[in-house]
Image: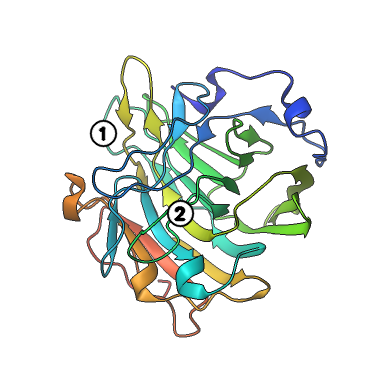
Amino acid sequence: MSRSRSRRAGLAVLVGLATFGSVAPGAGPARASAPMKAGFHAPAGAVHGGVVRAAPHNLRAAMANSSNWSGYNIGYLDRGSLFSSISADWIVPTATQRNRGQAEFSSTWIGIGGGCVDTSCSSTDATLIQLGTEQDVDASGVPSYSDWWEVIPGPSVTVNGVEPGDHVRATLSQLAPDVWRFSLVDFTHTAGFSGMVPYSSDETTAEWIDETPLLVGSNSGMATLPNLSRVRFFNATVNGRNALLSPAEALQLGGGGTGLPVIATPSVPVPARNGFNDCSYAATCPARPS
């Protein structure tokens, strides 16, 4: 079930204000909002190409545990403000097949909405606007890389190809009530995309995430994360300022009460508190890039 298996026509009607660079967009797999505590289930999201992005599960104590998110989620009740902009740089990781003969999927992204409004996950934000990069491996072991954006409940929109090792910067900001601008710049290849989209966001959470998707259809369940080289997030901002990340806002993929082994782990924030590393198939992750 790869991102390229199907395309959805007419998406421009849903996001009529969107504008792009030279590469025509195509619809990719969808992602769904609303995080999950133990026993809390996310609402159904838009499904595309047999893949849906689900929201995090089992948030949140010390380093919280999620069934598909690894990274940092900040909330309105902890921070005392709504979120109208977010940004970060990262290095596109290299994806290699972990299990022979199996297709594997991963996304690296920033977003507003879709998370827990505080570290105890007392409530969640069911809206989500996001953009990032995709790092997948097909069943024969061939990797594919792309960039994309999405507003829930619509499907994601694939724009360009990217390559492992590329330095990208993603930015999302609200220009006016319910009007958002998004951009992703690939500094390595002087490429990227930008656009505007109308969207009504609750603005109560913000995230910097590595994710595995939820597969639907004959092989329903969480996808397997490929082996990823260490993902380095840096220059993270929210509302135009240093994100000031806290270890209490971290999410580990797997472990805890998820019923999964540890699959991916974020580091503590770097000393400036505007970045972290994320390590696949590791219970710990160093904060400094290596």
Disc 2 marks which residue? 115
Residue at the limit of the structure toward the top, as seen here: 218
Mark toward the viewer: 1 or 2: 2
Q: Quadrant of residue 59?
A: bottom left
Mark 1 / mark 2, whichever is N-terminal: 1
Q: Quadrant of residue 170?
A: bottom right
The x and y percentages for residue 55 are 41, 44
Position of 52 with respect to 169 (left or right) is: left
The x and y percentages for residue 231 are 44, 59
**Residue occupying the point 58% across, 29% down:** 28
The mark tally for this picture is: 2
- In this orientation, which residue lies closer to the viewer: 32 or 69? 32
The x and y percentages for residue 206 are 53, 60
With respect to residue 211, does 119 lie above or below? below
- Few, some or many C-alpha atoms within 10 Å of disc 1 (few <14, some 14-19, many ≥20)? some
User: Which quarter of the figure is the C terminus placed in?
Assistant: bottom left
With respect to residue 162, does 7 lie above or below? above
Q: Secondary structure at mark 2?
A: loop
Residue at the limit of the structure toward the bottom, as seen here: 271
The x and y percentages for residue 250 are 36, 66
Which amino acid type is shown beneath numbered disc 1?
Answer: Asn
With respect to residue 31, does 169 lie above or below? below
- Few, some or many C-alpha atoms within 10 Å of disc 2 (few <14, some 14-19, many ≥20)? many
**Residue occupying the point 40% across, 48% down:** 35
Q: In the image, which disc is placed on residue 99?
A: 1
